[in-house]
Image: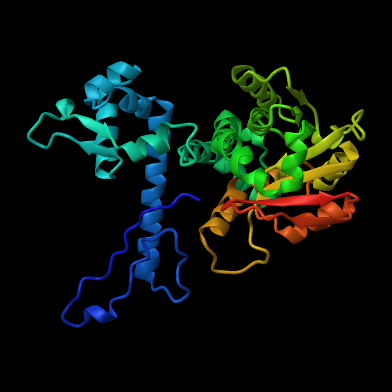
Amino acid sequence: MTSTTTTTRTHEPTATTAPAAAPARATDLTAPLPADAPAAVVADRVLAAALGSLEITAIHLGERLGWYRALADDGPLTSTELAVLTGTVERYAREWLEHQAVNGYLDALDGAEVDASRRRFRLHAGAAEVLTDVDSLAHVAPLARLLAGTGRVVDRLVEAYRTGGGVGWEELGADAREAQAALNRPMFLHQLTQELLPGVPALHARLAGGATVADVGCGEGWSAIGLALGYPGVRVDGYDVDAPSVAAARRHASTAGVTDRVTFTHVDAAAAGVGTVGRYDVVTAYECVHDMADPVAVLAAMRRMAADDGYVLVVDENAAEEFGAPAGPVERLLYGFSLVCCLPDGLSTEGGAGTGTVMRPSVLAGYAARAGFSRVEVLPVEHDLFRFYRLHL
């Protein structure tokens, strides 16, 4: 989880209020509201959330229009230069640049004495990494695009909440799908095989020895590609129900130069095991079981795909073991995504399990037992957002 810098304000002292008694204003979005928060504190919190929402919208504009990239590559820039470089309108570019400067993402190199269209703006080095470096573990800019995708279907969410049914990933569209892949890409390419899997010696040794791997629910393929790059002897077959994701995965594999050892198939994950019984040394599912309409059927397919001595790995959200409120940033983030994305997706198929993003270990253990696994082991892998499980045959 990346850190967020926030500001907490207090009431100004008045003739009747001593500074020591002044309550904190809830502008820190990383902390839950206190149970006894007065109306003024709650109102401040809502205003702070609105401020954050507007920043996210501006980040989405900057990413989609190429403004951050232009500033990183060619800055400092004026609004006129930025508009020319990106084929956009100067007046909009000017307002966006000034917004980014007043929020601290950019340095304004000129003040009010310079004509607005001639002011130069520079992207901070830290902001450039977060907003433009697609391989950095700090690259969280795709969150803005993911939230833009969910925002487009808010009326459908209201309808689903009222009448039942759900909203699937296909309705969220390319922004949500591509943003989800982009968010996980740095971890899959630069952390999974370098830091995380070596912490599981039995699995690491098997992969290093040249295993055959099935990656179920592979999305745009970065997990499979990361495994192939990190373990040159492995062969990975990725399976996913989403055709655009599979097409993107094939493009990514070609760019990465691993198409000789990585394949992708468009298929329902529950049926992925057909014709592959006992074929794989390792079977994986990264951050997808909680989204599945029928997780038991998918896990049963993964069990069939594994060899008799196969290793089945599930990586999913690092939800707390039990419900508790209030909670920290990770739990709150998971619940937020569950409301707008994962739970509606899980209920978009008739009879869907509706697991939601907050899949606790006990829930996965229940699914695994029904799928025929003997037990679920939580692996000793430390990660802020993900928990690693071995499902024993």
Q: Is residue 26 visible?
A: yes
Front residue of 321 and 56:
321
Could you tell whether 345 is left or right of 40 in the image?
A: right
Among the 4 quarters of the image, the one containing residue 364: bottom right
For the view shown, which residue lies furthest in the left direction?
Answer: 113
Q: Residue at x 73, y 58 (%)?
A: 361
Could you tell whether 363 is left or right of 273 in the image?
A: left
Instruction: State the image coordinates of residue 134 (x, y, percent, origin top left).
Output: 48, 31
Front residue of 324 and 310:
310
Q: Is residue 343 above or below residue 231?
A: below
Front residue of 318 and 377:
377
Instruction: State the image coordinates of residue 64 (x, y, percent, origin top left).
Output: 43, 27
Q: Residue at x 89, y 43 (%)?
A: 309
Q: Is residue 231 above or below residue 9?
A: above
Among the 4 quarters of the image, the one containing residue 157: top right
Q: How is the image coloured?
A: rainbow
Q: Is residue 354 visible?
A: no
Instruction: State the image coordinates of residue 147 (x, y, percent, origin top left).
Output: 51, 41
Q: Is residue 48 above or below residue 225?
A: below
Q: Is residue 312 above or below residue 73?
A: below
Q: How many marks?
A: 0
Instruction: State the image coordinates of residue 257 (x, y, percent, origin top left).
Output: 63, 18
Q: Residue at x 79, y 32 (%)?
A: 211
Q: Residue at x 24, y 43 (%)?
A: 102
